[in-house]
Amino acid sequence: MEKKATSNETEPLTSKKDVSDCSKGEDCKENGLLVRNPKSALRLVEDGNKVHPSQGDKGEAAQISNGYSGVQSSVPCNGEVEDAQGTAPAATTTTTTTTSTTCGAEAQQQLMELEDRETWSKKIDFLLSVIGYAVDLGNVWRFPYICYQNGGGAFLIPYTIMAIFGGIPLFYMELALGQYHRNGCISIWRKICPIFKGIGFAICIIDLYVASYYNTIMAWAFYYLISSFTAELPWTSCTNPWNTGNCTNYFSKDNVSWSQHSTSPAEEFYTRQVLQVHRSNGLDDLGGISWQLTLCLLLIFTIVYFSIWKGVKTSGKVVWVTATFPYIILFILLVRGATLPGAWRGVLYYLKPDWQKLLATEVWVDAAAQIFFSLGPGFGVLLAYASYNKFHNNCYQDALVTSTVNCLTSFVSGFVIFTVLGYMAEMRNEDVSEVAKDTGPSLLFITYAEAIANMPASTFFAIIFFLMLLTLGLDSTFAGLEGVITGVLDEFPHVWGKRRELFVLGLTIICFLGSLATLTFGGAYVVKLFEEYATGPAVLTVVFLEAVAVSWFYGITQFCNDVKEMLGSAPGWYWRVCWVAISPLFLLFVTCSFLSNPPELRLFDYDYPYWTTVVGYCIGTSSIIFIPIYMVYRLVITPGTLKERILKSITPETATEIPFGDIRMNAV
């Protein structure tokens, strides 16, 4: 029966008097809570009141008529934990009116937060957002290069195997976690395994690092886009102020000879006009800041801010353009590339299988790394996006659809790139391997830009190509920042819950200021350093620990039961084996391979000195260091013996709110 507070004292919320009034096996009403039986912690919230248990003890699930399950736990509102027999400590036999009022206000606030959480306007908004996040600039330049470098068509075998047993299971796991627990990358760990909460903070730092260099690449594309609005593209001739005596335009009608020291007009435009790397001596002397790139980046961050400041209902509409436009352009460029002379040479070089390559370990490492970074688990984005889904959304189907679209996009992008490289080889009268030696952004901004400049209607193709690069990058930026925003707002709702616009503004300003080093004349060196070291090993470590925490600490059985509550059926043995063993081993394999053989960095004619490797590892460590720091902090602040502290730290401390019509349920 419902208790009313008096001026002096009131019964505790878990009063044994109320429990004893309930017949065995019957539902009873206790303090506004519908309780299945005294042993169950599953409580249906009525009249806007809800008990949010703190440290729940896991036990066998109690089945109820609507198919949901609760876990054995009995925690009064004041935070005191009852003993195994359900007897509250003597100190909790009475509770003051102030405590009761505070508890009621807190429960009401938690209910309001759950009800106020926005959801996607349409299912397609979510799918386009996830596809836009997964399909980024790396699909256009990284996959084609890695594919032909590692055996061409033969590379598709390890790539597919790694996708099936590593990438897609991790992708599915994050979508399911975010959709079930409806929290960002920080606060979600209270409901899974609190001692791993440092993973959330590490993810936020990694996302900030990515935002600090990834948007600079888009600033380069924006510079190219502005420069494309001319009758003659500026990287087609050697008569510009930035050109040197080595500039050789072999596309001109005059007979020219290509020497070892020759540089193309496109290369000099990229290095001397856009980047201006000739004005820097390396990482120890970056030089001044390029005001042109600064203005380009400022405009990009302005677009980003007004696209995400209101939440997923706003960004979900923007991705209708940013996620679909690249596919239209890819199709146009594919058709155009296929009609160029020599295109078949590029396609043959791209897909010709070299079966001997499959015996090399590095090919499998590259396949694992490519599928992992292409799908993008570990950045908090999938958790954030899925947390805005409706509870019974089919995230299993979403995972299969979006990951398949992402992999196919990478494969098709290879044809777009290599038909043009074959054309370049035909025009230069060289092998495709000589033309395709540029890697990373240089493949787009030098080789591909040069090929476009020498096509008919070059201005049109240049404009749509660099627009495509911008849209590919923008929705990935939306996603990365949303991962941080959702994580922080869910963790500190009373501080930032009603100030999203202000927080997003501050976050974009921080990212812009953090990008200043990449806007210098030597900024391209900084971008490559961050790309190789700041995110790679750190994200691999984060997802490895995430997979271990979910599968081994939270429990694969409990996780599969969560999925069953959402989808109506539990994942099969294939998914269980992947989550428990294969996916963690997949991540451990890639991480150890990277650490045992760190990349030797070289950009243009600059060889990175040894100390940059140390700096790179320090940058990567600066994010994942939050994981052990929080573990120690958690153990220190938790009362009890060491064993008790560990047990409490690996036990979910907060209930998961499961929406069910107008009723809210708690289930650990």
Image (spheres, helix red, strand yellow):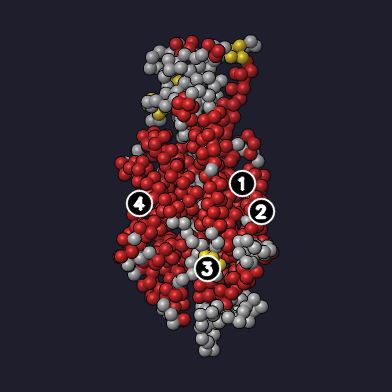
Q: CA distance from mark 1 to mark 3?
A: 35 Å
Q: Position of residue 428 (x, y in %)?
A: 46, 81
Quadrant placement of the C terminus: top left
Q: Position of residue 578 (x, y in %)?
A: 35, 44
Q: Of callouts 3 and 2, which one flags the residue occurring earlier in the amino acid sequence?
A: 3
Q: Which residue is mark 2?
A: 513
Instruction: Note whether 491 is above or below 71 in the view shown.
Output: below
Q: Is residue 281 left or right of residue 327?
A: right
> Which amino acid does the dot numbered 1 rest on?
Lys
Q: CA distance from mark 4 to mark 3?
A: 31 Å
- Which residue corresponds to mark 4? 164
Q: Work out whether mark 4 precedes mark 3 in sequence or the reverse, and give the earlier one.
A: 4
Query: Separation of disc 4 and disc 1 at Cα?
Result: 36 Å
Q: Amino acid at mark 3?
A: Ser
Q: Nearer the viewer, mark 1 or mark 2?
A: 2
**Kind of residue sitting beneath label 2:** Leu
